[in-house]
Amino acid sequence: PSAMNFGSGGNQEAKAWKDIWGCGQGIGAIEKRMPTAEFVDKLEREYNEARAALAAAFKATAGKTKEYVLVMLANAELFLGNDTQAATVYAEHAKRFPTSKRAMSSKTWLAYIQLRAGQNAEAAKTVEGWTVQAVGANYLAAYVLAWVHWRKGDVAGAQQAMAVAAANWKGNTGRASMYIDNLLLLARAGVSPADADKLLTQLATAINPSPR
């Protein structure tokens, strides 16, 4: 490996990502050639086995489960759409590890699940004490906080939190939904067309800032 040069340009004939492609960390999962469908089935089976192992560990160590097991299990349950199980694990993580750097993430997803289930009071309690200043650049936390404010009837607070979410949003995943949610908040709040245009212009600038 020390003799390999993956650079591009200059006197390099091979171009990185044109002639030379990285295999990625997933190369370790490849053991043999197989049809794509078979490999996908294998990934699904292994994922479910891993989730079952985490669930078993959670049950066997009730009240004493290690933090990494809680985080991995909660995320796995959420990914599979098992909101009730995910909420239980997120709640335990947030309670047992309140000073962890992952605590806000667990509370964010717990409140998200509660909001989705119409449990507005529970969601408000989960994020109690949060402010847009406290969540900072955590755009998912700001997004959830916006909906908590909205469900409480605090339109101004909802718009402020959603603006923070928009300004700090990373990547394109969920970006369109977040923009639509902003439109929804403005429409339901009865914001005048002129004010709505001004707010949406600010939002569009935050989402797609001019290149520097």
Image (cartoon, rainbow, N blue to C red):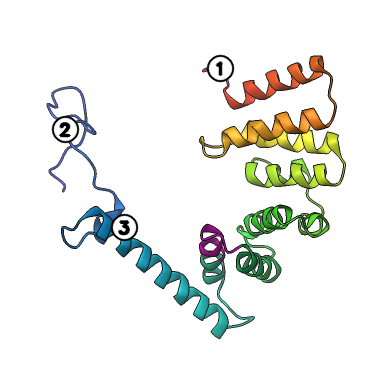
Question: Distance from label 3 to label 1 (Cα)?
Answer: 41 Å
Q: Is residue 193 magenta?
A: no
Judging by the rendered image, the residue that carries numbered circle 1 is 210
Residue 85 sits in quarter: bottom right
Give the percent coordinates (x, y) of residue 49: 40, 72
Question: Distance from label 2 to label 1 (Cα)?
Answer: 33 Å
What segment carries the magenta color?
Answer: 74-82
Give the percent coordinates (x, y) of residue 201: 69, 18
Dot 3 alpha-carbon crowd within 10 angstroms: few under 14, some 14 to 19, many 20 or more: few
- Tell me the kind of residue under disc 3: Val
Q: Identify the mark nearer the N-term, 3 or 1.
A: 3
Q: Identify the mark nearer the N-term, 2 or 1.
A: 2
Return the mark for residue 63: none
Question: Distance from label 3 to label 2 (Cα)?
Answer: 27 Å
Give the percent coordinates (x, y) of residue 196: 77, 20
Residue that appears at 78% across and 58% down: 119
Residues at badges 3 and 2 in contact (C-beta under 8 Å)?
A: no
Location of residue 169 with respect to 113 vertically, above or below: above
Location of residue 148 with respect to 126 vertically, above or below: above
Q: Main secondary structure of the magenta part?
A: helix
- Observer able to see residue 163: no
Q: Is residue 77 magenta?
A: yes
**Left or right, residue 129 beside residue 79:** right
Dot 2 alpha-carbon crowd within 10 angstroms: few under 14, some 14 to 19, many 20 or more: few
Residues at badges 3 and 1 in contact (C-beta under 8 Å)?
A: no
Location of residue 69 with respect to 166 vertically, above or below: below
- Tell me the kind of residue under disc 1: Ser
Label 3 sits on a secondary structure element that is: helix
Q: Identify the mark nearer the N-term, 3 or 2.
A: 2
Judging by the rendered image, the residue that carries numbered circle 3 is 40
Return the mark for residue 19: 2
